[in-house]
Amino acid sequence: MNTQKLTAASLDQLAADCAAKVPKNLIRVGMSTCGIAAGAEAVLATLRRNVAARGLKIAVEQCGCAGMCYAEPLVEVAVEGMPTVTYGRVTPQIAGEIIEQHVERKLFVQDYIYTVKVDDEK
Amino acid sequence: MRNKKTIFLGDSDQQGREKAVYEALAAAVKAESLDAAVQLVRVAETGKAGQGVVVRILPENIDYVQVKPADAGRIIGESVKKNKKLEDLTPPAKVRQIKIVLRNCGRIDPERIEDYIAGEGYQALKRVLSERTREEWINEMKLSGLRGRGGGGFPTWMKWNFAYRMDSAEKYVICNGDEGDPGAYMDRSVLEGDPHAVVEGMMIAGYLVGAQKGIFYIRAEYPLAIKRIQIAIDQARSYGLLGERILGGDFSFDLQIRLGAGAFVCGEETALIASIEGKRGCPKPRPPYPTVSGLWGKPTVINNVETLANVAQIILRGGAWFAGIGSPSAKGTKVFALTGKVKRSGLIEVPMGITLRQIVFEIGGGVLKDKRIKAVQTGGPSGGVIPEHLLDTPVDYENLQKLGSIMGSGGMIVMDEDDCMVDISKFYLGFCVDESCGKCAPCRIGGVQMLGYLRRISEGKASMEDVDKMERICAAVQRASLCGLGQTAPNPVLSTLKYFRREYVEHIKERRCGAKKCASLLRFTIIQEACKRCGMCLRACPVAAITRSAANVYTIDPAVCVKCGKCYETCKFAAIKQE
Amino acid sequence: MVRIKINNVELSVQPGTSILDAAKKLNIKIPALCKHPDLQATAACGICVVKVKGANKMLRSCCTPVEEGMDIVTHDQQLQDIRRTVLELILSNHPNDCLQCGRNNNCELQRLTADFGIRQVPYPQFLRQIPEDPSTKTITLVPEKCILCGRCVHVCQKIQNVWALSFLERGVQTRISAAGDIKLSDSPCIKCGQCSAHCPTGAIVEFDQTDDVWRVLHDEQKYCVVQIAPAVRVAIGEAFGFPDGALLTGKLYAALRRLGFKAVFDTNFGADLTIMEEASEFVERFAHNKGALPLITTCCPSWVDFMERFYPDMVEYFSSAKSPHEMVGVLSKTYYAQKKNIDPATIAMVSVMPCTAKKYEITRSYEMFASGHQDIDIVLTTREISRMIKQAGIDFVNLPPEGPDYILGDYTGAGVIFGATGGVMEAALRTAYFLITQKNYEKIEFENVRGLQGVKETSVAIAGKTVKLAVAHGIGNVEYVLQKVQKALKDGTELPYHFIEVMACPGGCVGGGGQPYGVTDALRIARSKGLYQDDREQKVRYSHANPHVRQLYAEFLEKPLSEKAHHYLHTRYFARPMYRK
């Protein structure tokens, strides 16, 4: 755990440093109560296992509830050079396909995308 | 690969029509030899409803709706190849969500403070501590027009101002995370998904009113929220953002979590305070108000989770920015938990002033299984139903009140033709009776009496006089109850009576439940003409209510039947009628 | 002053006045049920609601303070309907057995229902099945009749600071019980009966022992004798339509004889006796340094029970003298029995007290059997004796007064003031002064210890020494006094007091848990006035000048604090657990 006490100036510096460190290749799994109730823990575990097994350079993180609770478990996939999409109603099996198709082979998995991120949205 | 275009397509009504369009597009792509440059992806959800097949082309970000297979050629040939927008397929502008409270939910790891800091985290706190005066910031909150999001709708700046003006060395700010309305989970998601936003809001509130301690009161039924808020507090402390001399200035502040213990009434301010003080969670008469004498008798500000999650953004972008969103009497956005018979249930954050119809059909995707919408219930057990013909009402505090409901904390439940209004009011009243603290007679006894009448109505054992008696009790409970729980407990009853009296009359006079929900009023009969005499229903019946006569005629004895519906489910020949 | 309007009439009131109290100034009685003048409003019943212009809700007048410019409506059709409906709801959850209830004809709920003219409750009745709790054998809890006004909890927790009663569960399951849902007798309950005194309905009543008394009165083998406490004579009149505080000693003696008691004694005799013993004790400790100071009075059994449970390490400061009625009790079965040649085994001694705790006191330790039998057989409260008098067909109002059996019934002015807070202290001072200086104190009425202030701290000079005094009433006021003493003892500094009187009931015994219902400060003052009037009318006003007390010592006890006096008239104290398993 960090022990640096922030000042106004070091807060800004930390913000800049952290913003710069956001990985360009990133998978986010919704891990709030709605997601967990729908089975997100197993999905997260599968994604992490597959990424490690294949030695892929993509971060796998948890995030909160984005609001599309009816479609949980939700998995957002950002791969450099491809539009960022969110897969919904993901099972461990689909999770495997996401790694194999989308991350490794840069091919979207058909019929499971719920949102497509456009640039003007933050 | 870098110049690759992606075409996403899906059926906005989930009818599978995108497959044909997909084939047509694939053929068109092949015809134009664009295989290497264009990727076609079928999606499960388009975020739109009633717009046929929807197409999105990236990276140009062009959306087309009502796309038919015949349009494929034009889309590839003109739009993709020559960048010409096809006006006839362009969708009309629709209402969109604006994420202020939920801006970070789903985008950051809530257990990593660095993620929050990277996204302007604690910048608002920094500004408040170093620039301008307290009065100026409170005025900024006034300009924003932010009103309490827990349901009270009280102007946030005014509450802070009252506490600020109190002369006391000891003051408190409390975050009300007791969220008790059934079906409402906006606060839970914010606490779980972006805990630091609430922490920062608390700190700003604490600094402005002059408090040194803040308390998160979180219901014990939210263990993940409790865990994440504790992690956030610990991480903030480790960075010196909580504790002594924050960010190098004079402000010292710390936070702790106190748990609720299963009482809806402890969402009420004075009961919440009693609970933190270790007493029975019963409300106290007001005045004195908490801002004058609250926790431990000191000036206390209690704010809802969602209210606090708005604060940092208002500080950073200005009150005028916030006031520019929403409607004249209700500024900003509101997070609603859209649930019930709706296709896309979940949390939405929309500007105040959009209509219920827009919420349900444009954002919510319409009614589940495309059934007929009957009403939308807002405000939880304190609210009422808005019938179909009033769904074009813009959502704000006053409009909903005028219609006999309330905004409440944001629960919004879609009801269709299969929902019985008597059953609905019975459910909500049952909830209020369970949760009544019992201190004051009108709520404690009136609630039980009203529930008794509703039960008898739903069992076909009531008279029209009973409705009059119930309405009399409603008036007394509304006016003479000590706190908001009792004062609003009759709302679902009064609201359903106002708009759906016909259903009550049906239950009483005809002993019939039109929605087929009230079990006692269901009648199961065997349609003799359709009956194949297979005897499966007889075997399925758990109480032996079905008998076979000597002439091989099957009948259901209504006196024995417990309306479980097993026979109805079992019959393969649709020979059993449920009415 | 704050200017407001009530029903279109303007008036000015002190800031902080509740709307309910402000309306009284215009002779408007806003109906209310759960509010008691002694207590802060609990805001529970919802009947006192009024309309205030500009407020979007109806407000409870009992707890809402007036504000400048308030425009209030107290009565209109809507308010009337709402109040009526709330009362009907309360009645729908209340048993309908007024005729058989301990508060029949004397119940606040009954009165309100009659005032509202309710003839039928339109809603189905549903009762709570909660068993009664008579375990203390002094007060009985009847939860089915409880309207959850919260007064008893407030009194027990805030006024008495005992915290025996509390609310359990919630919603319509809410009930009042000893905390932890144990029996009241296993709780810290000190049986002061203040809960019953404040209860508006029959939910807390005294443990009725009138049947036991009828039985002994009609038992030919029994020789029944009776004594009455000071506070009873000024309160009994309330059951018979007399003005508040009317002094009815003579009528009471007459009525008791008609009931069948063979001898009518007076606890005031015991009070004079207590003063002889206790003042002598004080002189020993104060003037001769024999024994620990401060000396603390013990005539109040609730107070004794409280100390034994909450501050057991301080019981050494208690006076070892028994309470007055116990003294009369033991003497009735020894001194009196011997003199009249009656077999003490046949004597049934009945004490009529303003107190519920006395029902417990009579078996609290084996010293209560010093006569060789249970010194006092039954204790009746003022309420019970008034019922017996009525049952026996005695026309109390017109009874010619009689005198007591002087042998144990003669009393002085000092004895009778025991019933008011400060009375024991004043009586003790009158005699202590004499014992130390051999002269009577010039100022016979000691104003500084009288009155309803919770803790009265004062001092008196006796033979050049300053005697520091404290008088407390209402157990909630005791903590202040005891903590001051504890601190001085721990730090070794000068004692804040030498002599302390404590009465558990606010006002002293006149406000006792067994007195007629409806106690308020006005009533406490009126009843005390009756006692002080009796003091003034007595020819003898010093305990040490009571001729029959002198005779008792000469013939039987020798002198105060003698061995015989110790055997019969003194007792011990113990540490007792706050909660019993």
Image (spheres, coloured by chain):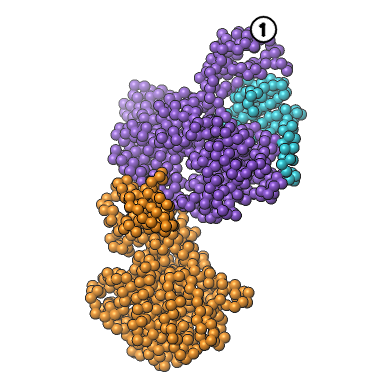
Residue B357 position in % (x across, y down) = 47, 26
Picture quadrant where residue B32 is located: top right
Q: Nearer the viewer, residue B160 or B135?
A: B135
Q: Residue at x 35, y 86 (%)?
A: C539
Seen in the image, is B511 located left or right of residue B85? left
Image chain in purple: B
Q: Is residue C77 above or below residue A116?
A: below
Residue located 39% across and 41% down the image? B490
Question: Closest to the observer: B289 or C194?
Answer: B289
Q: Secondary structure at mark 1?
A: loop
Chain A display color: cyan
Q: How many marks?
A: 1
Q: Quadrant of the N terminus of chain C?
A: bottom left
Q: Residue B24, how many percent across, how many down?
A: 60, 10
Q: Of residues C95 and C546, which is closer to you in this image?
A: C546
Q: Specify whether residue B7 is in view.
A: yes
> In this picture, is B421 found above or below B257?
above
What residue appears at the point 36 percent right and 30 percent down from the top-left corner? Answer: B514
Q: Quadrant of residue C313?
A: bottom right
Chain letter, orange in picture: C
Q: Which residue is mark 1?
A: B32
Tell me the kind of residue under disc 1: Glu
The residue drawn where x is 54% and y is 77% is: C497
Name the chain under label 1: B
Q: Position of residue C155 (x, y in %)?
A: 44, 63
Q: Is residue B152 found left or right of C117 in the rendered image? A: right
Most distant residue in the right direction: A55
Question: In the rendered view, does B517 fall on the left or right side of A109?
Answer: left
